Amino acid sequence: MNIFADLFLTFAKIGVMTFGGGYAMLPILQREVVEKKGWATEEELMDYFAIGQCTPGIIAVNTATFIGQKKKGTLGGIFATLGVAFPSLIIISLLAGVIEAFSHLVWVQNAFGGIRVCVCILILNAVVKLYKKAVVDKPTLIIFLLVTLCSYFTPLSPVVFVVLAAAAGIILKSLGGKKS
């Protein structure tokens, strides 16, 4: 298959299966992009996701753009981005016309409640997988715990956490390297 069509179709598949936003797409991205296609390693995917979160735009679109660009340059990034956005564009266009008419129905509200719970579990599964790959020593555990506490108790932007965690990683790893 043509690589551009493959990028578009793979990310369209990811886009159509992603309910609940960027965090919910992590397990799907990991399966499709890392395990099935081998377009990125788990570490690269985590890096793209982190950068995608702290840059303007939607995490899913940013991550798709990074992976497509890595695989086939700027044009690859464009095809991957169009692929991940296309299903949402179609689904939202269809739903926009009917959502108001049905949103008051109890079964629709209950369905959305169930979907929210499911998305929480998908996000939790992604966090557990990412944790196992990211927290590999004492310095990364310290960064993890500090960011967890600060994100819970402060209103700081995720961008601030990413920048501070990067700086802490540099400092802690360089201090640890000097001791060895």
Image (spheres, grey):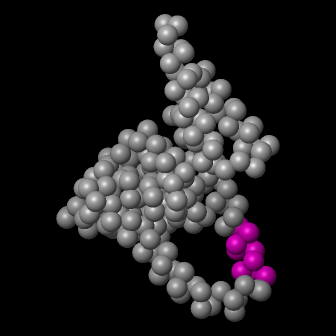
Q: Quadrant of residue 139?
A: top right
Q: Quadrant of residue 105?
A: bottom right
- Residue numbers of the magenta segment: 106-114
Q: In the rendered view of the protein, which quadrant contains the N terminus?
A: bottom left
The answer, for residue 93, to whether it is visible in the render is: yes
Residue 113 included in the magenta stretch of the image: yes
Residue 112 included in the magenta stretch of the image: yes
The residue closer to the viewer here, 61 or 90, is: 61
The residue closer to the viewer here, 50 or 113, is: 50
The answer, for residue 125, to whether it is visible in the render is: no
The residue closer to the viewer here, 160 or 3, is: 160
Residue lying farthest to the left in this orientation:
2
Left or right? Give the position of 28 relative to 71: right
Q: Position of residue 80 (x, y in %)?
A: 35, 63
Q: Position of residue 97 (x, y in %)?
A: 59, 91
> In this picture, is 100 found above or below 30?
below
Residue lying farthest to the top in this orientation:
180
Total numbered circles: 0
Q: Position of residue 25 (x, y in %)?
A: 52, 57
Magenta residues, dominant SS class: helix
Q: Residue at x 48, y 13 (%)?
A: 177
Q: Residue at x 43, y 51 (%)?
A: 31
Left or right? Give the position of 47 relative to 80: right
Left or right? Give the position of 111 relative to 170: right
> In this picture, is 176 found above or below 90?
above
Q: Residue at x 44, y 55 (%)?
A: 63
Q: Position of residue 48 (x, y in %)?
A: 44, 48
